[in-house]
Image (tube, grey):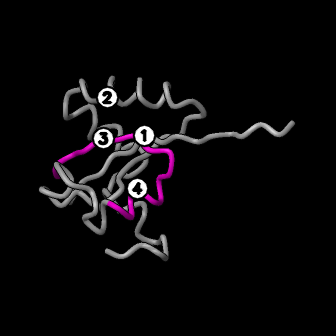
Amino acid sequence: MHKNIHQYYLYILSNKYKGTIYIGVTNDLERRVFEHKNKLVEGFTKKYGLNKLMYFESFQYVNDAIKREKNMKKWKRQWKINLIEVDNPDWDDLSKDWSYLID
């Protein structure tokens, strides 16, 4: 019997270096970033132009991703900035080379 392995992602979007931060969870990171970049998602990210992927983590279980998201949303802003800057000090859009995405 083949078992499906699922992947879930916690992700952080921004609009610029040390700009507004959004934290979300998805089961398809590429699709979700595409939706944000093309303003297909109503609400906070569309209003503030948050379409640059700054950080992400992957999880096998959706509950783990949601737990991490809820925890991080309680963090101080500086903690979120520090987390991004460990691996992405220049706040580069990690999705900029995804060929199918339109920015």
Question: Residue at point 31% right, 74% down?
Answer: 103
Q: CA distance from mark 2 to mark 1?
A: 10 Å
Q: CA distance from mark 2 to mark 4?
A: 19 Å
Q: Which residue is mark 4?
A: 32
Disc 2 is placed on an element classified as: helix
Q: Which residue is mark 2?
A: 72
Of the residues under marks 2 and 3, which one precedes in the sequence? Answer: 3
Q: Which residue is mark 1?
A: 10
Task: State the image coordinates of residue 40 (x, y, percent, origin top left).
Answer: 28, 63
Task: State the image coordinates of residue 90 (x, y, percent, origin top left).
Answer: 31, 58
Q: CA distance from mark 2 to mark 3?
A: 8 Å
Question: Residue at point 35% right, 38% down?
Answer: 83
Mark 2 touches mark 3? (CB < 8 Å)? yes
Q: CA distance from mark 1 to mark 3?
A: 7 Å
Of the residues under marks 1 and 4, which one precedes in the sequence? Answer: 1
Task: State the image coordinates of residue 91 (x, y, percent, origin top left).
Answer: 31, 56
What stretch of residues is rendered in magenta?
A: 17-35
Mark 1 touches mark 3? (CB < 8 Å)? yes
- In the picture, residue 46 is in which quadrant? bottom left
